[in-house]
Amino acid sequence: MKTNLYIKSKMILIGKLFLMSLILVLFQNCQSEKSVEEITSLLIEEHGGENYKHSEISFEFRGKQFNIYRNGNEFKYERVYTDTAGQNVRELIANKGKQKFTDGVEIELDKKGENKIDGAVNSVIYFTLLPFPLADKAAIKKVISEDSIEGEEFYLLEVTFKQEGGGRDYEDRYVYWINKNSNQMEYFAYYFHVNGGGSRFRKMVNSRRVGGILFFDQINYSSDKIDTDIENYSSVFKEGKLEKVSEIIIENIVVKSLR
């Protein structure tokens, strides 16, 4: 009789443990469904949040001045420099389109000229404002795996783009390494299609917060072992076998709040 009671109690205990395990699995699954938006929201908030949306930002990159104006839905991105002929050049991307001025005179742009401004102005500002652009409606986000680098744990956030609103490089693919503890982006990789295509891996360095926004310099790497599977870059990075391509250093950062 005692043996039967013992077996019955054992079976009840096993049943409870199984039910608890099932509930835990279901809970984790529910959590994972929310994790993409939660991770992205915490990431952007940690890096600057609302400060991105209402501010004037200026910085220098490779001898050229970049100016960013964002106030709600209104924006203007600008690059200012002196060309080899000694002329003052202003290139702009704004709500109303793209413009170029030389010594104050507007230059008519064809499609090639507009694409050149996209590459020279928009791309630099896009990388400087990361991760804020991930909030764009055209960005399709997905957590694809997890990783460990130099003792830190990361989510791997994949970002692709809708054709509508995704710009001329909508077919590009990005992967971001998001630190689980700090909610900061510490590495990212991307595969691009322009100029024959290729891929890069960037490490964030020299972080500093200006006007409530976190800015980084970046070390740009490449590898002939990596093609479209850019999430594998960290393995080659940990082996110390990446080729350093360049350094992205932004200087003289000024942020003015418009709120």
Image (tube, helix red, strand yellow):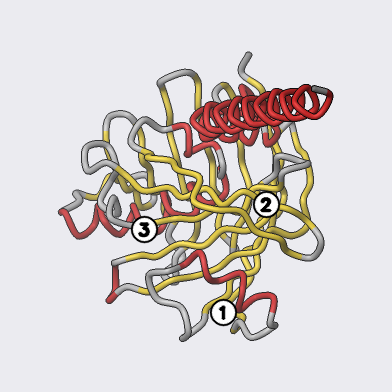
Separation (CA) of disc 3 from disc 1: 18 Å
- Check the picture and name the quadrant holding the C terminus: top right
On screen, residue 229 above or below 177 = below
Q: Earlier in the sequence, mark 3 or mark 1?
A: 3
Q: Amino acid at mark 1?
A: Val
Residue placed at 43% from the left, 41% from the top? Answer: 141
Q: Are marks 3 and 1 in contact (CB under 8 Å)?
A: no
Q: Which residue is mark 3?
A: 119
Rendered location of residue 227, percent (x, y): 40, 76
Residue placed at 36% from the left, 40% from the top? Answer: 93
Q: Nearer the viewer, residue 109 or 202?
A: 202
Residue 237 in which image quadrant: bottom right
Q: Which residue is mark 1?
A: 245
Q: Amino acid at mark 2?
A: Phe
Q: Which residue is mark 2?
A: 154
On screen, residue 85 above or below 128 = below
